[in-house]
Amino acid sequence: MRRKASLLSALMAAQRKRLVILAILSLGLGAALITQAVLLAEVVQRVFVEGDTLGGVAAALGYLLLVMAIRVLLIYASGRTGLSMAATAKQIMRSRLLARLTGSSLAGALAGQAGGKISVALDAVDESDSYFSQYMPKMIEALFIPVLLLISLFILHPNSGLIVLFTAPFIPLFMVLVGLSTKRKSEEKYEQLAQFSGIFLDSLQGLVSLKLFGWTKRQEERIERSSLNYRDATMGILRIAFTNTFMLEAIVMMGIGVVALELALQLVVFKTLTFHTALLVLLLAPEFYNLLKNTGTAFHSGRTSMGAIRKVEEMLETVEDDPQHETSDAMDALARKQLEQQLAEGPPLIELQDVCFEYEHFKLDTGRLTIHPGEQVAVVGRSGSGKTTLLHLLSGLLTPASGEVVIQHQPLALLGEELWFRHIGYITQHPYIFAGTFADNIALGAGRAVSREEIVAATDAAGLTELVSELEHGYDTEIGDGGRGLSGGERQRLALARAFLKQPSVLLFDEPTVGLDVQTEKILQRSISELARKATVITVAHRLYTIRHADRILYMEKGQVADSGTHEELLARLPQYAELVTAQREGGLSSRS
Amino acid sequence: MSILGGFIAGIAGVVLFATSGYLISQTVFAPPLYTLIVLTSLVKVLGFVRAASRYGERLYSHRATFSLLSRLRVTYFSKLVPLVPGLLNRTRSGELLARIVGDIESLQFYFLRVAYPPIMVVMVFLATVIFTSAFSIWIALLLVLGMLLTAFVVPGIVLAGRSKIHERVRSQRAAFSAEAAELLYGFRDLKLYNQLTKRGDRLRQMSEELTDSQRQEASGLLRGQSLHVFVTFLIYWGVLVLGSYLIMQGSLAGVFLAMLVMATNTVFEEAAPMAILPAYKQDSEYAARRLQQSIPPGQNLSSSEEVLGKMTPDAPSIKLAGVSYQYKDEWRPVLSDISLELPAGSKTAIVGPSGSGKTTILELLLKLHIPTAGSISLNNISVKAVDEADIWRHTNVVLQQGHFFRGTVRANMLAGQEHCDDSALSVALQRAQLQGLELDAPVLEKGENLSDGEKQRLALARVMLRSGKLWLLDEPTSSLDYVTERLVLKQIFEQAAADTLIMISHRLAGLEVMDKIVVMDRGRVVEQGTYDELMNGKGYFYEMKQIELQLLAEIEAS
């Protein structure tokens, strides 16, 4: 709760000047409002009661027009200020969110649904708009103008002032009642409501099945029934809201009616009031009520926006920072230069010194582990034993909770991720294809400007030339989201092409768990061994072939490297390993296998 | 009904203020007390009439809107029925569906905030104009002018200025969303390629531009609102000037001046929703347009050919000749030149890497799509000439994504054929290795409360109740362990002993029992034959088999 105040107050603190402007504008607006009523009453009084000529009231009419124009300008200016406030606040929130997202660690970025995060950065931020553009200006107006009006009423005619003063508190009271009762009711019915609205989406998603089983007619009835139920449930909530607004309006009407009646009595029976004052009071009283009503509406939208701001805040809190970011320049220049050169020349020595990582109920501890330059390492283990986490730690995508990854005798944390990333390649099981041309997607691997020839060579090495010839614009065809779709095997080969272009000195490879098409499988085998000639390759292996060709196998169990050695060694001394590599996929129908 | 309510409310408000103005003016000439009493009670009654009719208006307009929405959903659903699965082949079909749902929801604003306020405003104004014309035709004309300005001209101006910027905001929002999605989904790759900072900066810049455009857009609306207020004031002022002039001319009794002025004031209050109408109008129209576009026109599957053929209750033979199929928005065909002959009662497996077009063959057999080229026949009758509902009735289908709806296990199994009794259902469950599941057990939307394996077995149990002689099974056991898989498939093959069966299989092991294996790659049939033929041929299937042998079994850590 304390934090909640902090984001809002931080946003408001940046805008203190605008708040002052809003306050001044509100005062002006109140003054204009009253002046307008005074002038209007004046004109009516002179024309009607005193029988003045049009020329006689010309000045007053002129002023009236002027005041009206000023009032419009003030409304506009106040609105503009609100909009500027909203724009600044939104900008601040979005940059903070973005800074958090780009600065977050891998675990943070992958936790939760991406769709939800985007919706926070877009929709929730936009929803918060009305807090600054509507709610704040209205609240400031509500702070000043009603007070001004009340003062004028008391000066003009204390009785009316009293009537207004006593009826006015009912308005916020009813607003609160409306809010509370609808909230309770809607919470009661929330599940029901969600269910109703879910049925439609559910029906659309299951449409193929529904069709094949001949249920569409039945489903139509279900949709209609649920929609109507939804309507009735919603109407139940709305009816409360409407009843309350009915009461509210009745109170306002009563208030104005009583004011009018009292004025009339004063005028006629007691003759203590002039027509001018009476009319003026009658003009001012509704303005007062209107303002209160508007404030109520603004209050409602303010509450929704506040919820949105809370969402933004929650996300700012949950996405954790990556501690490695700040320490990147801590190495002295000479050592750095040396290391850069060594990395450029060939594969480095990699040491893991008791690297630990914890995630929910899972704990990984590598102990001491050395990977020599140019070594071919296969990591095997049951699913959930920490193989992929190990790759993430080696790549620097995850920062260890304790212990260190050491590259050429320098801790990775000191090395800085920028330099390290420049020399490693990481082929994941599901390589991401970015929206852009085919060439751009491959060039991404290099991290530098590359010539078309290089791209063509990489494409060829990854066996994608045939695909390119099928694309209508060749290398310049848009792929990825919104472009041409690629199959799983083609994506895998595109990732290979990126690696060929980059020529990393350390290649991390998360081998696909399922079989790809025959062509891709062959290309993968061939390409990895080609890349391995100039690089250390660490593979999370799912294929016997890979294991047999590795210099060393790390067998992982429950987050620890249980044993390491060649295939034959492990086969001989580690029964779990033997079980893992000999358990073949059996078929369900098989009667002779 | 709601329009009537709103109308009464508006008019009551206008009359209320007019009367109170008149009341005060009357008092100057000290009328008899009874006039005063009548007038004040009128004021009060009107106040309640106004509030009450406002209540009625809201109730009815919302009710009407929700009823309309429900009709809209049903109509839209029935329009979509003939279009699937063609509509849903896109990768982001989930988003499309969610969008359809959202768009229909947002149409409620069209009824409440766009279609309905102008009618109200015009009616209230007209009544006021008639009322005022009894006093002065000129003031009435002035009000008509005011009405035209506030109800049509001002929103028109705002709308004209808005459409361009609105379009820009929309495209900027979409671009931001797409870019943010790339950043999150591609986070790992971007980070590894040292692109994250660059992309982050780009996104920040996009956010700035978006915020700026949004502010401009809101400013436009604000200008409209201010203009509306200004016009209101101007008319108000005009009424005052004109009234004063008329009084001096002697053609209007002075008593009415205050009344007319206050009536003007109130009548414009009713027009306030008109100022924000453009915003809602654009959004709802956009939603409506998108809904329209979601239904591609002219995609009628029931071809013009006369539907003559009927599925016979015997096991059908299947023949595909030169069949190709390409989805509308895909760049290459999913199937090219497929020719297959499957005799009645045969058992066929289709294998191949993901994306090779296996599922599409089943969909074409079910007449969910019409081939772009080539022909398909069942029992030597072209599928084109058979009513698709007839095919579905005689086919036992298990899709990869079976649909389950909220209800009991029994209801989910029964749907479609109500003639089964509980014992038959229990037997089916047992044969699908789901002995543990009670018939009365609840099933949530999409079977959320069931595991993947349970869903697959329930789908198989459901299909075992059917009496079709054609079985089309799409990876029906991919989430089951080997032992269970073997037990379930054994049951299916026993029941289907005399039937024609096509099964897409994710595993190659165990396919020895199939009469024929069709091997697919990139939309083509690369090989077909029995297990032994294919293995001896040492072709594509053999190589797939070698890869499968190389693959380590995924074993869960214990």
Image: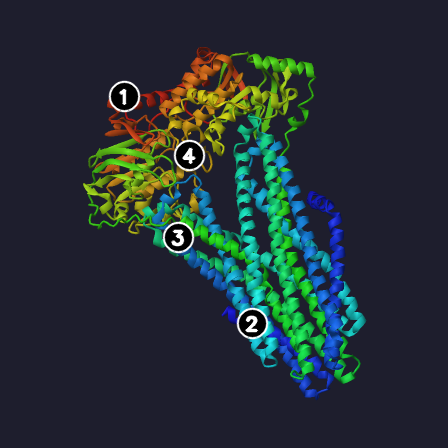
Identify the secondary structure beneath mark 4: loop
Q: Which mark is residue A485?
A: 4
Front position among marks 4 and 3: 4
N-term-proximal mark, 1 vs 3 = 3
N-term-proximal mark, 3 vs 2 = 3
Q: Which residue is mark 2?
A: B124
Q: Amino acid at mark 2?
A: Val
Q: CA distance from mark 1 to mark 3?
A: 48 Å
Q: Are marks 4 and 2 in contact (CB under 8 Å)?
A: no
Identify whether A301 is placed above or below B462. below
Q: Chain of mark 3?
A: B
Give the residue displayed 73% in from the left and 79% down from the top.
Answer: A53
Give the residue displayed 43% in from the left and 18% down from the top.
Answer: A527
Residue B109 placement, left or right of B326: right
Q: Which residue is mark 1?
A: B535
Q: Position of residue A77 (x, y in %)?
A: 70, 55
Q: Which mark is residue B77?
A: 3
